Each structure stands twice: as structure tokens, then as C-alpha cells.
Amino acid sequence: MSVKKFDKLTAVAAPLPLINVDTDMIIPARFLKTIKRTGLGQSLFHTLRFDENGSEREDFVLNKSAYKDAKILITGANFGCGSSREHAPWALDDFGIRCVIAPDFADIFFNNSFKNGILLIKIPQKEVDDLMEVAERGANSTMTVDLETQEIISSDGKSIKFELDPFKKHCLLNGLDDIGLTMEKEKKIGTFEENQKVTQPWL
């Protein structure tokens, strides 16, 4: 099994200047009745995106025409805190968000996102603030995220380097989840099993 590969992404970046955005804010618990990964995007940030009548809130960033096709999200510290629900990265991915940039993330959400092909980038608050300012320019806030070179290039030409665990980088570049990683070693597993039949036939 595999997930979508991530190498280089050029897209509109949406500013979400909020801290402590928890997984219930990303996708409320009432939408967790499915185990399918599709269709969850319509419920992403549901409380922020829609009013009590189900109408779009005009002031929410992802409802604005300039950001409806955003694939990069610039946000505040501790993004993805709260419960460990894997539906949160599923909802982001289904909506079209492929990269989230913040000062830091909740650990479980951080790992779940990478397993689902979403690149999370941790950079210092000052650099997040700079990108947030660029992102507020609307449709002119196009940025490029290059995973191979580990670099963010904003629309004003500024380049920001980011650190990333080499293993996570390898998985994203090759579109590998846990099952895909196992299947990479399929030949070695087969050889081991054949040898085991000879040396330990009672198993």
C-alpha cells in the first residue's frame, strides 16, 4: 500500500493564525462515523467554516475565493493537539492540503500526517510570521515547497530552509506508508521464509 508522493509543491498558501488548533477543530467528532478516507474534506474545520445553519462563514480563510484551492496551510503553534484521531489528517488530505507549516505540532498528529502523505514543516515562529504575512496577500501568496532540497520559497523570493527526519523524507518522496515500507523488503521476507522452511520445518 502507498500514499501520495511528495516532492515539490507550488500552490497558494492559506494563513490560519491560530494556536492550539486541536483535532476536534480540524474535524469534529460527529463526523468520525466512517472509516473511509474520502469525503471528509467537506467537514474540515467545520465549526470555523460554517454557521449553525450550515452556511459558509464569509470571514473564514478557506471560504474566501483566493484560498479555496489552497494546498499549503500556515498556522500557529501546537497544531493538531487533542485526541489522536487519524481522521484529522484524512480530512486535510481530502480537502487538498498537502503541507502544513507551523512552529510545532502535537506529536501523534505529526506522525499520523506523514503516514498519510502530508508534509508538516516546523520552523521558528519568526519565519512562520514572515510566511503568514506573505500568505495574507491572497491569490498572490503562491509558495513552493521543495522536499528534496528542504526549502520553502515564498512569492517574494525569500528562501527558508527546514529540517526533517531523513526517514520521514524518504517515505514522502517515495509515497510509502507502513505497509509500503514492509513491501519494500518483500524479497528479503520471502528468502527468510524459504530458509525457515528448511531449517525449522516444524514451524
Image (tube, rainbow, N blue to C red):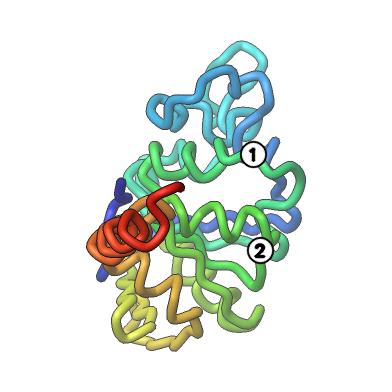
Q: Nearer the viewer, residue 137 or 187?
A: 187
Residue 37, can we see it?
A: yes
Residue 188 image-quadrant placement: bottom left
Amino acid marked by disc 1: Arg
Residue 30 locus on image (x, y percent): 66, 19
Within 10 Å of disc 2 (Cα), the crowding (few <14, some 14-19, many 20+) is: many
Position of 199 relative to 42 (above/below):
below
- Coordinates of residue 106 in the picture (x, y in percent): 70, 59
Q: Nearer the viewer, residue 119 or 60?
A: 119
Question: Position of 57 compared to 14: left or right?
Answer: right
- The image position of residue 153, as x and y in percent, is 34, 80
Callout 2, which amino acid?
Phe
Q: Quadrant of residue 135?
A: bottom left
Q: Which residue is mark 2?
A: 105
Residue beneath label 1, please?
A: 85
Which numbered disc, 1 or 2, marks the residue that appears first in the sequence? 1
Q: Is residue 70 left or right of residue 125?
A: left
- Where is residue 111 shown, x and y percent of the image? 57, 59
Q: Is residue 10 visible?
A: no
At horizontal 37% and vertical 66% (from top left) the residue drawn is 171
* Element type where label 2 sits in the image: loop
14 sits left or right of 130 in the view:
left
The residue located at (62%, 53%) in the rendering is 109
Q: Nearer the viewer, mark 1 or mark 2?
A: 1
| Up-down relation of residue 49 to residue 8 (above or below) | above
Q: Residue at x 38, y 28 (%)?
A: 38
Q: Are marks 1 and 2 in contact (CB under 8 Å)?
A: no
Residue 3 against residue 106 in the figure, above or below: above
